[in-house]
Amino acid sequence: MWPSLVQTAKEGGIDVIETYVFWNGHELSPGNYYFGGRFDLVKFVKIVQQAGMYLILRIGPVVAAEWNYGGVPVWLHYIPGTVFRTYNQPFMFHMQNFTTYIVNLMKQEKLFASQGGPIILSQIENEYGYYEPFYKEGGKKYAQWAANMAVAQNTGVPWIMCQQWDAPDPVIDTCNSFYCDQFKPTSPNRPKIWTENWPGWFKTFGGRNPHRPAEDVAYSVARFFQKGGSVQNYYMYHGGTNFGRTAGGPFITTSYDYDAPVDEYGLPRFPKWGHLKDLHKAIKLCESVLLNGKSVNVTLGPSVEADVYTDESGACAAFIANVDDKNDMTVEFRNTSYHLPAWSVSILPDCKNVVFNTAKVSSQTHVVSMVDENLRQSDKGATTFKWDVLKENAGIWGEEDFVKTGFVDLINTTKDTTDYLWHTTSIFVAENEGFLKDGSKPVLLINSTGHALHAFVNQEYQGTGTGNGTHSPFFFKNPIPLRAGKNEIALLCLTVGLPTAGPYYEFVGAGLISVKIKGFNNGTVDLSSNAWSYKIGVQGEHLKLNQGDGSSNVKWTTTSEPPKGQALTWYKAVVDAPSGDEPIGLDMLHMGKGLAWLNGEEIGRYWSRNSEFTEKDCVQECDYRGKFLPDKCDTDCGKPTQKWYHVPRSWFKPSGNVLVIFEEKGGDPTKIKFLRRRVTGACANVAEDYPSIGLDSQGEDKINKNTPFARLTCPGNTMISSVKFASFGTPTGKCGSYLLGNCHDPNSSTVVEKACLNKKDCVIKLSEENFKNNLCPGSSRKLAVEAICS
């Protein structure tokens, strides 16, 4: 996907790609390096170079990034005496080795700009300024050491440290935030760089679905360049997928879509992608004077200011901002009147004509559908879909790994080789217990520091306990059926991604604190100090069932009626590739929790866990005005946090694809489907007072007062096959639910159909030759269109 993703970014007006380097993906054990597949760093940098773009290499090698363990290899924690991210010899030794290895790899391939390559900046460490005070003198010394170690690599390009307020020269300190217009580097000799502008936010299982409006993202970027910004980077412009067990957190979802301008599946997200493309073009029209001129700040009224850039040639560019988060403003600037919506910036590359306003979105919106496609098998003789099924027993399989009185830490025990650690013990129930006679049930009480567990009694699943993305510890309380005599308690304890940042985060543990059963004649029985038998991982992992065939001596059961609601079950099916060429998702809505693979490639963790928030915590309409925070514009309260899982097209063969699912707690595999992510329509909603820079991308680079226009584009090999709605006048509603207003030009549909039918791309100008000029006197008129792509 890399070439097409890079190309989509370039088409969006991006000229630099920023990437992290994931230490734990590359150094699998000390000195044992891997650069294959998704970790082929040199290939990635060269793809960016071939596209004629630059690259910012964030070596870190601590990266946070909601990535497992913040990118640091787990093995490093178990080298004696190691403490991460402080003046600690073992940590610094391995960090320097890895940094040097990556730098030398880039030098060998001549990839630094000083060698004619695309890498213009490199980063050492990551947002360490937040955590440095916790490490006291060791933190201060470490930050200085890291900077000096990086500079000594002699790359010939500058080094940056983000959120690092004591970065020593010549290292450049940079900003990460939703807004960085007020940021000032600690030295006036340093350029003002924004390494992370967050155009959305990440998700956690059980959390909400955050969105950041395109108008606010554009506002933040325009304000940054208005106030002397040099480099601005979107984190993320494309977020993609946390395949396998790479998601950290804990509880970070497998999807890392981030509401980014390019979605998880690689499609431009309209209108965000298009609106930012127009913004980038507007800023670049000002580029020469921004680089070579001087600026003057002019107050134009309460909450309205202009920053005016002029150079010696007489060129002039202005940014006018209305920072009021409620009220629109009309102001006079250079003897001309300008209207600014609340919380918006207008860009005037010639100090006269507004070519872009951040609050006026001229870009189209795409209608994106997930088109169902049932799983198919090539076996022409078969009339029903067949699954292979294998059920694991709860608890210890084979020999236990060890027996211990009391509990162990999950992470220290598994060392992240698996999400799973079995804990089993037994309890003897006397025949005279009251609950055996009166039919009541004793209650299992479990206290845990995280992250989750599934409880089994005498092989039967009893329920799941879990923490969440803001609080890993949890308390599990569940009635359980006990019988007279011996009863086996088996707890499958889980991690859901390791911590990614924070002071001393590598010492944050997970696991059981206490296990008790309430309801005996003598009160509550505490099993915490019992002898517990432990087994690392589930049996299917050891048998390599995720590779499809696994051990040849595994006895799968083939059936067209696979069990539903059954815990600890492996499902395997041989499937054809979905039709078409659109990106693919796997619909796991009707499964419980587990892991999925295709042809041995790790799709990742799935979990049909509903958001723990109610509708009042979410919004129907998002107001872009005012400061954005992650929970400002959430959706999907009470719904599953993630139900679709991205499966790259390149993982499929035409037929004979082996899909493997490990279901931990029970689901319905007959409802698993593939989905094709398809753009099925396009909408535009443009008012008469909207600037129209978009047409300049047709080759004209001059600034002029173009007539506002709506532009519709269908992707791939699709065309505009019909016009579902068209109204020039005062239409209301949004894409998918437009309505006619009090005022409507009856020729609207005819005009749009004439311009657009059977075309991939069309422009409808809001001009007198297209629409009635005397329509809706006194009203602000606009054109709303929805078209079908097929």
Image: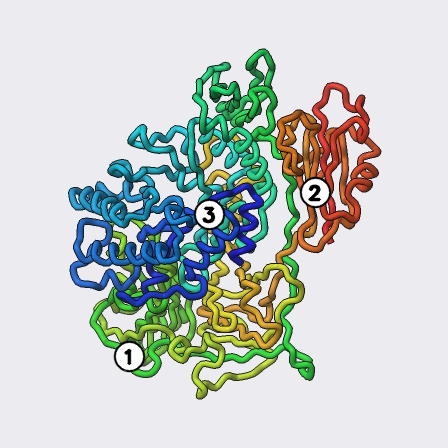
Distance between the Cα atoms at labels 3 and 2? 27 Å
Q: In the image, what residue type sits under mark 2?
A: Leu
In this rendering, which labeled residue sits more in front, label 3 or label 2?
3
Q: Name the residue under label 1.
A: 400
- Say whether residue 72 is left or right of residue 774: left
* Label ID, residue 519: none
Q: Earlier in the sequence, mark 3 or mark 2?
A: 3
Which of pointers 1 and 3 indicates the residue nearer the eye?
Answer: 3
Q: In the picture, residue 350 is in which quadrant? A: top right
- Which is more toward the observer, 293 or 617? 293
- Which structural element holds mark 2? strand
Look at 54% across and 25% down and name the residue there. 342
C-alpha distance separating marks 1 and 2: 63 Å
Q: Position of residue 194 (x, y in %)?
A: 40, 37
Residue behind mark 3: 17
Query: Amino acid under label 1?
Result: Glu
Q: Which mark sits nearer the N-terminus, 1 or 3?
A: 3
Residue 725 visible here:
yes
Disc 1 from disc 3: Cα separation:
49 Å
**What percent of the width, then of the height, locates residue 453?**
37, 64
Image quarter of the C terminus? bottom right
Depth check: give the residue in front, 288 or 429.
288
